[in-house]
Image: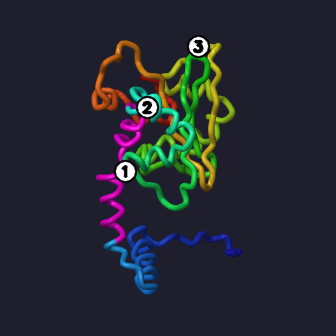
Amino acid sequence: MNTSGSTKSLAPIRSRVDAVQTVLERNGLDTDSFIDTFNDLAVEQWLPRNGARLIARAWVNEEFKELLLQDGIAAAKSMGFNFPAHHRYFVVLENSEKVHNVICCTLCSCTAFSIIGLPPDWYKDLEYRARVVRESRTVLQEMGLDLPKETEIKVWDTTTDTRYMVMPQRPPNTMGWSEEKLSNLVTKEAMIGVAVL
């Protein structure tokens, strides 16, 4: 602890990054390969399109919908999607006229990123994480979603091994649409629960 009253300044960010990289490389980790692999996953594979495809299939296939709601991981894997080992449970929350679901992670910013993509900046913000559990209706209104007073709002907080995704209500006048066309309607915001379609 510095008792002299002076404040010790931090090294520039580039120096700190280089120091961390040096330690990782000394311990046998190939940081360049990891960065390339992670970038490929984040940009090419972990896309909101994955969750949109799951939801569109559930809208047109009742048997698949039952599987998705009962065992989200099995349903996702049946369509070729994978999860990190620590995502032991993937729970899909179905919105209805009476209940609207919204997800958050009060401790950090966890999401089912391999299915709905990396979390948006606002999702990681402490204000969203703290307020959505206490004053969900107000937070949703501030984000542009004004739900009827009679609609119950349920907030689901991600845990160490459980990830959530909201299944929004299917928009009216979409009967007969293909899965592909339906999936184009689904947004990351709707899968988090801060928007409707």
Q: Judging from the image, what secondary structure is the residue with disc 3 in?
A: loop
Q: Which one is nearer the viewer's eye here, 85 or 103?
A: 85
| Lower position in the chain sequence, tag 2 or tag 1 | 2
Q: Which one is nearer the viewer's eye here, 79 or 40?
A: 79
The image position of residue 139, as x and y in percent, is 58, 29
State the colouring used for the structure image: rainbow
Residue type at mark 2? Ala
Tell me, for residue 120, which label it has, or none.
none
Q: CA distance from mark 2 to mark 1?
A: 15 Å
Q: What residue does disc 3 label?
A: 148
The residue at 58%/25% (across/down) is 100
Q: What residue does disc 1 label?
A: 80
Q: Judging from the image, what secondary structure is the residue with disc 1 in?
A: loop
Count the numbered circles shown: 3
Residue type at mark 1? Gly
Q: Mark 2 packing: few (<14 Cα in 10 Å), some, or many (20+)?
A: many
Q: What residue does disc 2 label?
A: 58
In reply to whether residue 152 is colored magenta, the answer given is no
Q: Quadrant of residue 175?
A: top left
| Lower position in the chain sequence, tag 2 or tag 3 | 2
Residue type at mark 3? Pro
Is the residue under label 3 in contact with that under label 1 (CB below 8 Å)? no
Is the residue under label 3 in contact with that under label 2 (CB below 8 Å)? no
Magenta stretch bounds:
34-56
